[in-house]
């Protein structure tokens, strides 16, 4: 005897709504069978109209049919289950965290792949098949599976939100247009979407234009910062070079002043040594004459005394003993004073110029400073830009280098000449 399972087709015992083996199968007046839970859920959505239809043949019933369990069909389904004709789906078909679950699956939920905006139900691949095969269901609008279907339903009439009320700026259903939104300015959601899409496009275009403007400003600001960095580095290098030159120049002038003092010292000492030698010679000559006078005073030869006395007692002639003069209080106090004054003046100049440099470095914010790439002020120098050099007392301008005039070799030469004029012959 052949196995009776060979003559049983699982599709004949599947619910057209959930596409699984029938659970508590019921037959409705048109003859189609469904799971009791599936058909009750479907008809619950039609309670407000009072008209109920078969999801397959679309035959309508009024009033709502009373459902009773088909015991014969239920027994056959149980037999199919025992025969193992129903295979378990792969694990990846089940809904996990973040997935939209199929609303039809009664036990372990499968992942939904589409949501029906007419049925307001999300379907897995298996339960979606009637929407592809049944002519009435083919007319339903399917969208990608979404877990926010309730947001698309009117809370008052449990109907799909497919109309937009411009008066109240909200989405409504068709029944709302005949109720509290009667007489309002209403359009289809599709039409309003088209208009809003155009507005969105314009807004997006303005936003993109603003982004481009800001990116241009960002690029300009970065370039300005780079330019500022390069300019600062160049200023540091120039300052280092200028200060090095100044230090070298001061070192040279120090050596020149030192050499000048030593030369004056050498000349004065040489002069003094010459005078010392002459004085020693004069003293030696005077001592010799004094010795001769002493010897003559004790001689007993009167003739010799008389003959030598006139010669030895006569004062020396003007050419014999020259006049010797020398500055007894010679010193370098004037030199030390001049050098000290030079130090004070240098410090004053440095203070003045450093104040200028500090004011140039701290003036204005970066947004204003970076925006200016150059330019010169019109007209002559202002009173603030003009001042006198604390060394030479001559008028200098803002753009002149620090101590450029007063520390030229020509000026230092004049300074040395002035030092010489203060006491050094």
Image (spheres, rainbow, N blue to C red):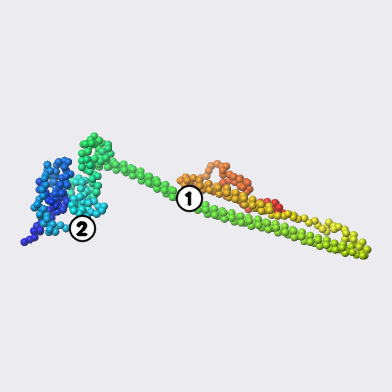
Q: Image quadrant for the N terminus?
A: bottom left
Outermost residue, top side: 183
Q: In this view, does 307 lie to the left or right of 7?
A: right
Q: Is residue 40 visible?
A: yes
CB under 8 Å between callouts 2 and 1?
no
Q: How many labels does the image show?
A: 2
- Separation of residues labelled 2 and 1 (CA atoms): 65 Å
Bin the neighbour count of mark 1 within 10 Å (Cα to Cα): few under 14, some 14-19, many 20 and up.
some
Instruction: Identify the secondary structure beneath mark 2.
Output: loop
Q: Residue at x 65, y 55 (%)?
A: 257
In the image shown, does 133 or 24 lie closer to the viewer?
Answer: 24
- Which residue bears the numbered disc 2? 90
Residue 24: image tag: none
Q: Which residue is drawn at 79% across and 60% down?
A: 279
Residue 101 image position (x, y, % from top left): 22, 51
Q: Earlier in the sequence, mark 2 or mark 1?
A: 2
Q: In this view, does 317 lie to the left or right of 2?
A: right
Instruction: Identify the secondary structure beneath mark 1.
Output: helix
On screen, residue 165 above or below 331: above
Outermost residue, right side: 303
Residue 352 image position (x, y, % from top left): 57, 47
Residue 382 image position (x, y, % from top left): 56, 42
Q: In which quarter of the image is residue 191?
A: top left
Q: Is residue 416 visible?
A: no
Residue 164 image position (x, y, % from top left): 25, 40
Q: Which residue is drawn at 52% across and 54% down?
A: 237
Of tags 2 and 1, the one toward the viewer is 2
On screen, residue 173 above or below 7: above
- Which residue bears the numbered disc 1? 228
């Amino acid at each position: 005897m052949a196995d009776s399972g060979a003559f049983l087709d699982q599709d004949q015992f599947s619910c057209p709504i959930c596409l699984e083996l029938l659970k508590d199968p019921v037959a409705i007046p048109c003859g189609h069978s469904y799971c009791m839970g599936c058909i009750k859920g479907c008809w619950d959505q039609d309670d407000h109209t009072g008209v109920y239809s078969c999801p397959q043949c679309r035959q309508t019933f009024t009033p709502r049919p009373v459902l009773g369990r088909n015991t014969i069909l239920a027994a056959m389904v149980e037999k199919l289950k025992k025969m193992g004709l129903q295979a378990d789906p792969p694990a990846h078909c089940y809904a996990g965290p973040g997935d939209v679950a199929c609303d039809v699956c009664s036990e372990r939920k499968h992942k939904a792949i589409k949501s029906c905006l007419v049925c307001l139900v999300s379907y897995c691949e298996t339960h979606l098949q009637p929407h592809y095969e049944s002519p009435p269901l083919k007319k339903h609008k399917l969208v990608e599976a979404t877990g926010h279907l309730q947001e698309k339903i009117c809370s008052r009439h449990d109907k799909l939100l497919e109309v937009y009320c411009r008066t109240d700026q909200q989405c409504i259903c068709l029944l709302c247009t005949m109720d509290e939104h009667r007489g309002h300015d209403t359009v289809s959601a599709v039409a309003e979407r088209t208009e809003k899409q155009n507005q969105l496009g314009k807004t997006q275009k303005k936003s993109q234009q603003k982004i481009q403007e800001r990116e241009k400003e960002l690029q300009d600001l970065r370039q300005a910062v780079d330019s500022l960095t390069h300019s600062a580095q160049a200023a540091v290098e120039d300052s280092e070079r200028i200060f090095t030159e100044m230090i070298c120049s001061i070192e040279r002038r120090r050596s020149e002043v030192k050499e000048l003092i030593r030369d004056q010292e050498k000349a004065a000492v040489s002069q003094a040594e010459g005078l010392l030698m002459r004085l020693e010679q004069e003293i030696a000559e005077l001592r010799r004459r004094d010795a001769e006078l002493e010897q003559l005073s004790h001689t007993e030869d009167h003739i010799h005394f008389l003959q030598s006395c006139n010669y030895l007692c006569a004062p020396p002639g003007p050419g014999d003993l020259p006049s010797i003069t020398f500055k007894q209080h010679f010193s370098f106090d004037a030199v030390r004073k001049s050098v000290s004054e030079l130090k004070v003046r240098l410090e004053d100049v440095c203070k003045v110029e450093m104040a200028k440099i500090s004011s140039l470095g701290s003036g204005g914010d970066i947004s204003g400073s970076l925006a200016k790439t150059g330019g010169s002020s019109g007209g002559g120098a202002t009173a603030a830009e003009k001042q006198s050099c604390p060394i030479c007392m001559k008028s200098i301008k803002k753009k002149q280098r620090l101590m450029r005039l007063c520390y030229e070799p020509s000026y230092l030469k004049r300074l040395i000449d002035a030092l010489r004029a203060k006491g050094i012959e």
